[in-house]
Amino acid sequence: MVVVMKERVTTEQVERVIAHLVELGMDVHRSTGAARVVLGVVGSGKVDPRLIEMMDGVHEVLRITEPYKLASRTFKPEDTVFSIGDVRIGGDEVIVIAGPCSAENEAQVNATAAAVKRAGAKAFRGGAFKPRSSPYSFQGLGEEGLRLLRNAANAHDLKLVTEVMDISQIEVIDKYADVFQVGARNMQNFTLLRELGRTRKTILLKRGISATIEEWLLSAEYVLAGGNTQVILCERGIRTFETQTRNTLDISAIPIVKQLSHLPVFVDPSHGTGRRDKVAPMARAAVAAGADGLLIEVHCDPDHALSDGAQSLFPSQFDRLMAELRIIAPAIGRSICLEPIARRGWAR
Ligand code: PEP
Ligand code: MN
């Protein structure tokens, strides 16, 4: 931390600040320039920079270390890579998670799982507990949805990612899923994050709808602090003044987070744009920008989907996107499910 004193500071004011910092367990290195006194502050004490900024004679306080530790690259310089069964997250391969917004019925879940597997997805997504903006919208099938999703994932050798909205759902979801998804609306549900930190399953942590990158990394810190090191960060668009898209997908968050943190970064272009015609361009951009994976909504019959149909890809569009990603990924030294399970003609 660096404390910059005001230009016309008195010696007593400087000494009072130094004494206070020393009392808090810090070492203070004082330098006096032509115009200002600057204090370099290091140590393991707990200091609230805003309180120091309130002291007489202080111009501003600059933090030089991140407020999160376990999530930071300073703490762990090498990329975090881990496996969910035979699927490696954070390695050279770009991992694609795809499936419907919600589990609706057995036929829909099975047809969609078959389609995403054929195109090269490694994991199946689908919600059984849905955080809907309106209490009158479809809320998900609950445990029956989990059962349908798990059966379809098993039948097609896919890992299963599903959303947990509340601590009370952890136990039942744990029986079915490989990855707990924490949705945008819950990114700062700290009790939920703490509880998930006690599990030993992968947590896919979406960025909150109006969360800064620092707040997002602090939320990841809650999970890491509980001893669960398997955290995936997922950019899913933030709320801005723009109305053309459902959210504004922050592609620049990818290189920024990869610099600040060692954790794998995924991108969800479906919620990021809200429109299926914008999903493929943003998915391509995300991979080109260095995303470690994608989370994409695909539905066997999106026009009749019970949630998020407008942003769900038809299977043929998903096939085509995967084929395009197979060209983009190697250009930046990545791979992506090199052998498609079956080649199909794509609808143009
Ligand atoms: C979802 O993935 O279906 C979802 C609800 O996402 P988000 O939390 O990003 O809105
Ligand atoms: Mn959705």
Image (cartoon, rainbow, N blue to C red):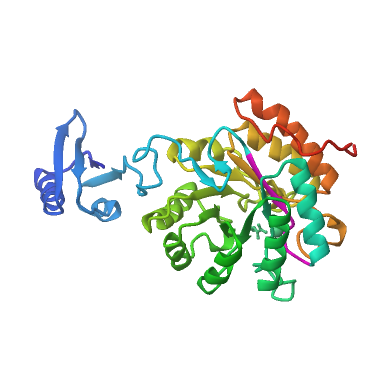
Q: Where is residue 260 in the image (x, y as percent from the top left)?
A: 43, 39
**Apparent side of residue 230 relative to residue 176 in the rendered image (left or right):** left
Residue 315 or residue 289, whichever sits in front: 315
Residue 150 or residue 76, whichever sits in front: 150
Q: Which quadrant, please, contains the C terminus?
A: top right
x 38%, y 55%: residue:
227
Q: Where is residue 9 in the image (x, y as percent from the top left)?
A: 17, 43
**Apparent side of residue 9 relative to residue 115 in the rendered image (left or right):** left
Q: Which quadrant holds residue 184?
A: bottom right
**Apparent side of residue 291 relative to residue 274 in the rendered image (left or right):** left
**Apparent side of residue 219 relative to residue 336 in the rendered image (left or right):** left
Please state the total of marks drawn on the protein image: 0
Residue 106's place in the image compared with 55, above or below, is: below
x 45%, y 36%: residue:
79
Q: Where is residue 18 in the image (x, y as percent from the top left)?
A: 13, 46
Residue 339 or residue 75, whichever sits in front: 339
Q: Which quadrant, please, contains the N terminus?
A: top left
> Is 192 in the magenta?
no
- Quarter of the displayed picture in which ligand 1 can be seen: bottom right
Q: What stretch is highlighted in magenta?
A: 95-104
Q: Which quadrant holds residue 50?
A: bottom left
Q: Which quadrant holds residue 77?
A: top left
Residue 263's place in the image compared with 171, above or below, is: above
- Would residue 142 be seen by someone viewing this image from the given angle? no
x 9%, y 47%: residue:
12
Residue 201's place in the image compared with 97, above or below, is: below
